[in-house]
Image: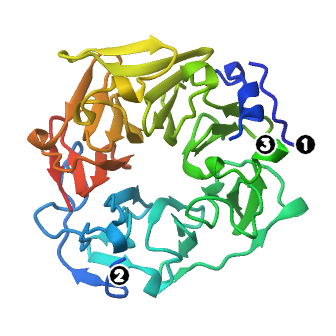
Amino acid sequence: MAARAVVPSLKWSSLLVSSALMSKASCAALAPTLVISACLAACAGGGQGHGPDAAMVRLPFTYEQGPGGVYNGGVRAIYQDRTGAYWFGSHLEGVCRVDGDGIRCFTMADGLADDQVRSIQEDAEGRIWFDTATGVGCFDGGTISSHHPRQYGPLAAWGLESEDLWFKGTEPHGVGAAEQRAGVYRGHDGVLSFLHFPLVFEQRSNDGFSVTGFAKGGGTRVWIATYDAVFGFDGADFLVIDGARMGLRGGTEAPHVRCVYEDSAGRLWIGNNGVGVIMIDGAATRGLTPVRGSGEALLRMGAALMPHESGDAGRSLQRVFSIGEDREGNLWFGTIGGGAWRYDGATLRQFTAVDGLTTADVMAIYRDRHGDLWLGGEGVFRFDGTRFERVH
């Protein structure tokens, strides 16, 4: 059955396709295959403290700016594979794998499509896939390849299965020549199919629909974040959440979405670079705001905090680039300039250098197979239930 861009009404049917969306004009390389031998023993015990030992070795990332002062966000992707190995993708310096034998790193010199690794996934055969700034890479246990069968046009139809992988287009920003329209790659049975977003003609080549992130929801549902909107797909219907649906000034304020996350209660959280955190629960839209001078949080109806209202960026949720959830069901938000914030449903708690989190920019939030919480930025940090320790 063909996918339909219709939404009668997160209790899936309550998110409306806004008419505003349909009318809005809208580095330094590491040595090839670097291997650092070390005894990285896993910590004993069944609670906190799984994974590589912090005292042994750190990742060989420099965290230096790129040519011309290009921003380096540090570690922006974290993943633990089925063997227990951890993968850390960097903003400018490739990807590293950490296990009990040491650290092995890969860059473009080793076959990686680009040294900016935006996300890491694993397929049913245990192969590790990397979504980079300019293409897709796959590690088969020995080497990385970046050339995979692709489908375009009529052969590429929207579908959805639980083992699917999802990737952005082949341009760092905008639409690639082979793709021609805004959309996303679906990885299924080793083939990458480029699927077009349900957009009107005027919007099909709009850079505002460049992909910024993915999240899997209940069932087989997938959420796709773009700068101007969030697309949801359940295998049959699309949900399109634009600025109007997010409650941004009656739809006249364009969002700048950087991440999306569906929590264990089925609520959708959207992180914006400039307007903070938006939560959608059924038909309700709310903005998450810290109350000045207290640890309380305000989930107010309508839009999140506007840029001019936010005050000190180091004390706000204005620029949110990552969202995750811990084993207790608390929500975590990673910001640019403000460290990380934890929301327990009533209060907000900011974590910064005094809590062991020495990076002000948090680009990745990840819960591993043991339930431990990891954050990435200028370094890799693990939460012990009270504070953070730098692991890499």
Considering every residue shown, the one lying at the far top of the view is: 301
Quadrant in which residue 378 is drawn: bottom left
As displayed, is residue 252 above or below residue 127? above
Q: Is residue 282 left or right of residue 321?
A: right
Q: Which residue carries the number 1 mark? A: 1
Instruction: Mark 2 or mark 1: name the one nearer the start of the chain.
Output: 1
Is residue 333 in sight in this rendering? yes
> Residue at 79% of width from left, 20% of height from top?
8
Is residue 96 in sight in this rendering? no
Q: How is the structure coloured here?
A: rainbow
Instruction: Please tell me whether mark 2 or mark 1 is closer to you in this view.
Output: 2
Q: Which residue carries the number 3 mark? A: 199
Quadrant in which residue 356 is drawn: top left
> Residue at 84% of width from left, 46% of height from top?
201
Mark 3 burial class by Cα count in 10 Å: few <14, some 14-19, many 20+: some
* Residue 277, position as x, y percentages in the image: 43, 29
Q: Amino acid at mark 1?
A: Met
Q: Are marks 2 and 1 in contact (CB under 8 Å)?
A: no
As displayed, is residue 10 above or below residue 203? above
Mark 1 burial class by Cα count in 10 Å: few <14, some 14-19, many 20+: few
Instruction: Mark 3 or mark 2: name the one nearer the start of the chain.
Output: 2
For marks 1 and 3, give the CA distance: 19 Å
